[in-house]
Amino acid sequence: MDQQEFLRRIAPITVGALSTNCYVVRDSDKCIVVDPGAHGDKIAGAIAGEGLTCTIIVCTHGHHDHVGGVAALKRATGATYMISEGDAERATRAIELSSHVFDVNSPDIANAPEADVRLREGDVVSLGDITLRVIEAPGHTEGGIVLVEDDANVAFVGDTVFEGSVGRTDLVGGDAATLKKTIARLKEELAPECVLLTGHGNPTTMGRELMVNPFFL
């Protein structure tokens, strides 16, 4: 499918105290939910209200603000939960690992359950004619991933890239040198016209970031 058609299938939902971008990706009457960071029950209700069935939950990394709604959403929908091999265990301890930096005392977030599927480089998350290719993208966390719809030229980048910036590396598991290597790889693999759907803030494109993002220079 072309880029515009794929983007029309995506409904962003802003969740949690850190305003995380959760994405609902529709295929007919089913959907994939990317990064349900909080309010899993509300996400489930919104999906049901649109007549959709959530069959896959996939997270770009294991921080609490990206996995905090997984448990509730999975309970409500029975969806298959996927995260990288590198961040699967982190996600089950996400609250504890964030508690020294963030206020995580909220009924709307919880640790993620054990993953149903642990993703690795080159794996594919698919639903109908949607195919999301896994690129391992460590640096923000040890096991961060980017999910690329190659036909549509759209990538879910989590907190690896932001508009004009990149994800922080001062949290547990972050590493600036590793993130720099990940950015270098994305510059090679993703076309300038690729739309980047970020974990926080506005979407952007590779072309824009190549021109203005100091971490891409």
Image: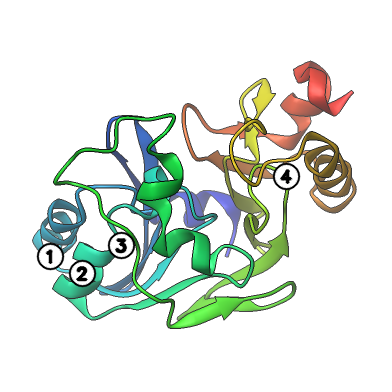
Q: Nearer the viewer, residue 138 or 55?
A: 138
- Specify the amino acid type for callout 3: Val
Give the vertical position of 210 relative to 135 (above or below): above
The residue that disc 3 covers is 70
Give the vertical position of 172 relative to 26 (above or below): above
| Crowdedness near tag 4: few (<14), some (14–19) or many (≥20) residues, C-alpha within 10 Å | many
- Specify the amino acid type for callout 2: Leu
Residue 9 x/y as whole percent: 39, 56
| Crowdedness near tag 2: few (<14), some (14–19) or many (≥20) residues, C-alpha within 10 Å | some
- Specify the amino acid type for callout 4: Gly
Q: Which mark is residue 108?
A: none
Q: Secondary structure at mark 1?
A: helix
Give the mark nearest the N terminus, 3 or 2: 2
The residue that disc 2 covers is 52
The residue that disc 1 covers is 48
Q: Secondary structure at mark 2?
A: loop
CA separation, marks 4 and 2? 34 Å
Give the mark nearest the N terminus, 4 or 3: 3
Give the mark nearest the N terminus, 1 or 3: 1
Along the horizontal axis of the image, is 70 left or right of 194? left
